[in-house]
Amino acid sequence: MSIFGNRKYILTRGLDDYFTGVYKAYKFIALFFKEVFKRPFHMREVIHQTFEVGLKSLALISLTGFIVGIVFTKQSRPSLEDFGATSWLPSLIGIAIIKALGPLVTALICAGKVGSSIGAELGSMKVTEQIDAMEVSAINPFKYLVVTRVVATTIAIPILALYCSFVALYGSYINVHAEETSSIISFYLNAFKTINFLDVATAVFKTVAYGFTIGIVGCYKGYHATQGTRGVGKAANQAVVLAMFLIFVEEVIIVQVANWFRYF
């Protein structure tokens, strides 16, 4: 085979693998929406997975949000001081954290922690044939393993993002209070003064989309893991990378759509 024929074969095979992957992902997502509204709902497992996603990420989210609030305030203060507008600092911090940083930081942390965990857990169950054993036992593994985890991430991550935003604002308040001795009530009132309903709705919608993305990507990569223990690590790594990439894509799209609504 000539060098050109070999390149054509590699390109054709790459395109086939890509479109096959897209089709499998489409079928996986379509099956989720088909199963999520069917009984049984496995509420005990949903609550358990929500606990795993939410409460066990709380310490990391708290620390990260607090540091983000302090650092962003320290970085913003000199620029506002040049224009004599330090009184606008709480409003600036509120806009930045509630509209962008809170949801995005939470999603990225959970993509790394939760996405890799789901991918590795389901991947290990796949390569050790535990999923096949569940099918033999007349249990729907997709319903029990995938649907419950995706629902849990979709519920937990918006709550974590809201919590992260308030912790970040508190970190910002500590920095502002150290410089200006302002009260926490006036700080929060000024921080939310420029936030409207569209901003809050956009932030909530983003976090729901992020949660669904993290859950579905982690489950998809783990559910289709191959090549033994090596495939488990590969599935966990791909779940993190793909989830983070899709989060950034969703961020750009949702922000653009929200900006269109501002003109109506």
Image (cartoon, rainbow, N blue to C red):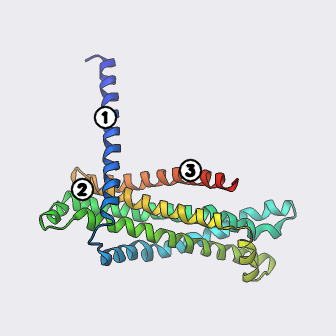
Farthest front residue?
264
Image quadrant in which you'd find residue 103: bottom right
The picture places residue 104, in percent across and down from the top left corner, at 55, 61
Q: Earlier in the sequence, mark 2 or mark 1?
A: 1
Q: Which residue: 87% across, 64% down?
A: 84
Q: Determine which quarter of the picture holds residue 53.
A: bottom left
Q: Which residue is mark 3?
A: 253
Q: Residue at x 30, y 22 (%)?
A: 6
SS class, disc 3:
helix
Instruction: Measuring from the top left, give residue 124's x and y in whole percent.
Output: 25, 61
Residue 194 position, x and y percent, is 74, 67
Q: Residue furthest right?
A: 84
What residue is disc 1 on?
Answer: 16
State the residue in front, 48 or 169.
48
Q: Residues within 10 Å of mark 3 (few under 14, many from 20)?
A: few
Q: Of the two numbered discs 3 and 2 on the same chain, state the one appearing first in sequence.
A: 2
- In this rendered view, identify the residue nearer to me: 250 or 123: 250
Picture coordinates of residue 47, whole percent (x, y): 36, 77
- Residue assigned mark 2: 229
Q: Nearer the viewer, mark 1 or mark 3?
A: 3
For badge 1, the amino acid type reads Asp
- Dot 3 amino acid type: Ile
Q: Earlier in the sequence, mark 1 or mark 3?
A: 1
